Image: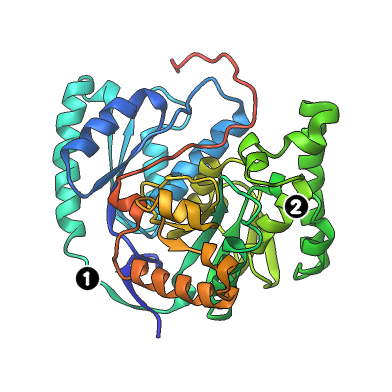
Amino acid sequence: MGFLGYPRPDGSVGIRNHVAVISTVSYANGVVQAIADAVDGTKGITHSEGDGRSPRDLEVTARTLIGLGSNANVAAVLVVGLGSEAHGAQEIADAIAKTGKPVERVVIQQSGGSRKSVERGTEIARRLVGAARSIQRQNADWEKLTVAMECGGSDALSGITANPSIGCFADWLVKNGGTVIISEVTEMIGTEEILGRRARNEETAQKITAVLDKQKRLAGEVLGPLASGATISPGNVAGGITSIQEKSLGCIAKGGTSTIMDVLEYAAKPEHRGLHIMDTPGSDIFSITGMAAAGAQLVIFSTGRGSPAGFPIAPVVKVSTNNEIWKDLNDDMDVNAGKIVDGTRVAEVGEELGEFVRSIVGGKETKAEANRYDLLAIHAAGPTVRRSTAR
């Protein structure tokens, strides 16, 4: 038995039914937010990126926005552009429209300015929401589900309680044909041999080694002799983590024990079902954004220090690593893995997490959704360069 989800024209299945209002460039953020505030059923996708970035970063931004609009949790899209950006509204809209879902656009410089753009965009968004609400849930197999695994504000218990429990669910989903993505390769340093042995072939093993070697070089270039210790945060240290290797072993536990199918570029969609690694920085919000752009409809997020972060278009399930966070931040936590310390088996918490995920997939809100705690950020790796916005 699978789950009830929203069917999309391209064969994907959503667990949510949002209309996304997407800014192509940061200059359009105000119009996007005004439309999203005015129309219930929409989610505003705003960000800080735009012209002035390197060609690589402009490409990553476009790929991310297209991926977010193509995510199965999105029923329809309104793209809002300024009119003179490198990747304009027409380009982004045309790419998303290949999924078959309704896509429309508003260009501020062609619509008479911000106020008129808000008026026109609000009218379009209301129409798109009305159409989306007519879509009925249908039965779908678990192979239609992609889940992003994230950890943030880790503590000494992350690799003992929450992450192994998440790993149990990851193994279950992969066994049932689904897809899992783990990220933050800076937090996998020191586990190259372990991950390499789990690669599906030599090519994938070499990709794992290459991406982790790259991160070690970058850490060395930026931090010098501090690289071996400064790649864990002050919060991690306060939570009892002593080294990057300790944190890395805990980090990879949330991916379970399945074969690693591939290493993905940031915001790139998997070509196979199963477990994947995505090349992202060690930042929660950058990483979640990249995995959602790759198609993840759900995020499972462990935290030991306490993170309330959610995401606009994908529900985020928060798993506390310890009993204190569960008690002190109960308005933000969904599942408590801290009870493993009191004697509950990891497998039991993994089963509890699986049952909770089924309820979320079925439509129940996570705490982050109920709190409307939507955070999004696109990873920009290159330098800022001067470029006129005029074509």
Residue 61 lies left or right of residue 141; in this view the side is right
Q: Residues within 10 Å of mark 1 (few under 14, many from 20)?
A: few
Helix, strand or loop under label 1: loop
The amino acid beneath tag 1 is Gln
Labels 1 and 2: the sequence-earlier one: 1
Q: Position of residue 226 (x, y in %)?
A: 81, 30
Relative depth, front residue between 277 and 230 = 230
Q: Which residue is mark 1?
A: 136
Q: Residue furthest front?
A: 342
Which residue is at 62% across, 45% downward?
Answer: 239
Q: Position of residue 120 (x, y in %)?
A: 16, 33
Is the residue 252 above or below the residue 1 in the image? above
| Quarter-of-image position of residue 281 | top right
Is the residue 348 above or below the residue 51 in the image? below
Which residue is at 71% across, 44% downward?
Answer: 186
Q: What is the count of numbered marks?
A: 2
On residue 292, the disc is: none
The amino acid beneath tag 2 is Glu
| Eye-nearest disc, 1 or 2 | 2
| Quarter-of-image position of residue 91 | top left
Which residue is at 58% across, 80% downward?
Answer: 175
> How far apart are labels 1 and 2 at the CA level?
46 Å
Is the residue 4 above or below the residue 47 in the image? below
On residue 246, the disc is: 2
Which residue is at 55% across, 32% downward?
Answer: 58
Q: Position of residue 80 (x, y in %)?
A: 31, 34
Q: Are marks 1 and 2 in contact (CB under 8 Å)?
A: no
Residue 374 lies left or right of residue 181; in this view the side is left
Is the residue 60 above or below the residue 164 in the image? above
Residue 90 lies left or right of residue 32; in this view the side is right
Quarter of the picture containing the C terminus is: top left
Q: Residues within 10 Å of mark 2 (few under 14, many from 20)?
A: some
